[in-house]
Image (cartoon, grey):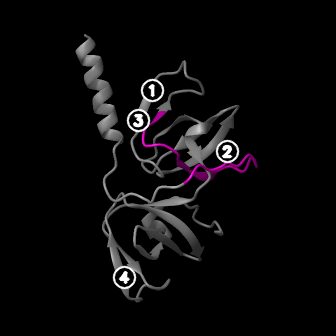
Amino acid sequence: MARRVVGIAAAAAVMGLLIGGGAAARSPAPEPDASGKFPRFESLRANKVFMRTGPGEQYPVEWVFLRRDMPLEVIVSVEHWRKVKDWQGAIGWVHQKMLWPHRDAMVTGAVRALRASPAPNAAIVARAEPGVIGKLVECQGAWCRIEAGDYGGWLMRGEIFGVEPTETYP
């Protein structure tokens, strides 16, 4: 019986792992924005974060995120807990200390072309695999600029997770 439980926990951890490149390390940040604006995006502060079925440590772990800087959509705040949604639509609760207000974006779907300017015919400066996380720099209309490692470029909003469809950023 114990082996089965361990196997299930390990499988859940593996399922939470995302593939692709990571973002650069960051120094500690202040606590998440307490403005009360929902929904909003924040990013994971650590490489291992538990998503629970309710707002407290007494609730079971439903998912384990293994990717620092992965963006999550914060949809509700209850005391020190945030109800979040990931890029696949999974919803659960994360402690506020596991999030920070840095804006990151994750490439979704397929290999995406990062373009030199916000235009469909602009030169391709790099290609990004699904799961690549980069710093969200700015958004102009249907386009957003991200920086991932030594590369930066423009992607269409529909090619990334981490920004609202009509949000002005910064």
Choose between 83 and 81: the one closer to the eye.
81
Residue 31: image tag: 2
Give the residues drawn in magenta, as a range: 27-50
Give above or below for 129 relative to 30. below
Residue 64: image tag: 3
- Tell me whether circle 2 and circle 1 mark residues in contact (CB < 8 Å): no
Q: Measure the alpha-carbon separation of dots 3 and 2.
A: 21 Å
Q: Which residue is mark 1?
A: 61
Per the image, label 4 sits on a secondary structure element best described as strand
Of label 3 and label 4, which has the lower sequence position? 3
Which marked residue is nearer to the observer: mark 1 or mark 4? 4
Q: Amino acid at mark 1?
A: Val
Which marked residue is nearer to the observer: mark 2 or mark 4? 2
Of label 2 and label 4, which has the lower sequence position? 2
Of label 3 and label 2, which has the lower sequence position? 2
Per the image, label 1 sits on a secondary structure element best described as strand
Which marked residue is nearer to the observer: mark 2 or mark 1? 2
Residue in the picture at 56% in, 53% down: 27
